[in-house]
Image: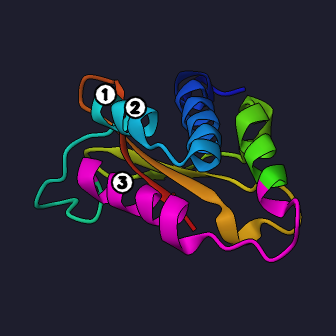
Amino acid sequence: MSQIEKEVKPYMVQILNLLGSALESGNMTDVNKFIDKYVTESTAENAFQGRQVTKDNLKNFLTNKISFEFSGTKKEYISILKKADANDISGIDPYKSDSTINFDSTFYPQEGFNLYAVRFIFSKLSSGVYSLDAIYVL
């Protein structure tokens, strides 16, 4: 596992597990606490990222977007999210610019759930720390 993966995958696993619990309970409190603690605020440069954008996207996913047509499918997806670990997260694809290193990583639960992949966007700050800029459910 690369150094980047060691640094950021624990956050990815934590939010996946929280999403599973929120999908099961219908309660976004723990997801929102995670977002408030770890996701950066939107700025003029990243207006489509940040805390509120992430909260809105995940709330939309949990309350409106997700529709399961087969009995047991929602329960299966909840179980997959709650049991997710670092090995379930795909490789990290970096994009380097002069001032930052940005990268995306995506969690595809398993065959049949590709519509509900979870995408993470991080940036490397000048301090060397990685900031979580957004989480999207695709």
Q: Are marks 3 and 1 in contact (CB under 8 Å)?
A: no
Tell which circle, 3 or 2, labels the residue nearer the N-terminal end. 2
Which residue in the protein does label 3 denote?
A: 54
Range of magenta residues: 50-74
Question: Which amino acid, by three-letter code, is at mark 3?
Answer: Thr
Which residue in the protein does label 2 denote?
A: 34
Q: Residue at x 62, y 40 (%)?
A: 16
Rate crowding at label 2 as few (under 14), some (14 to 19) or many (20 or more) other CA atoms within 10 Å.
some
Which residue in the protein does label 1 denote?
A: 37
Q: Residue at x 35, y 52 (%)?
A: 55
**Considering the numbered disc 3 on the image, is that residue within a helix, a strand or a loop?**
helix
Q: Main secondary structure of the magenta part?
A: helix
Left or right? Give the position of 101 relative to 106. left
Q: For residue 88, what is the image quadrant?
A: top right
Q: Are marks 2 and 1 in contact (CB under 8 Å)?
A: yes
Answer whether residue 124 is magenta in the image: no
Residue 16 versus residue 98: which sits nearer the camera? 16
**Considering the numbered disc 2 on the image, is that residue within a helix, a strand or a loop?**
helix
Question: Which amino acid, by three-letter code, is at mark 1?
Answer: Lys
Answer whether residue 58 is magenta in the image: yes
Tell which circle, 3 or 1, labels the residue nearer the N-terminal end. 1
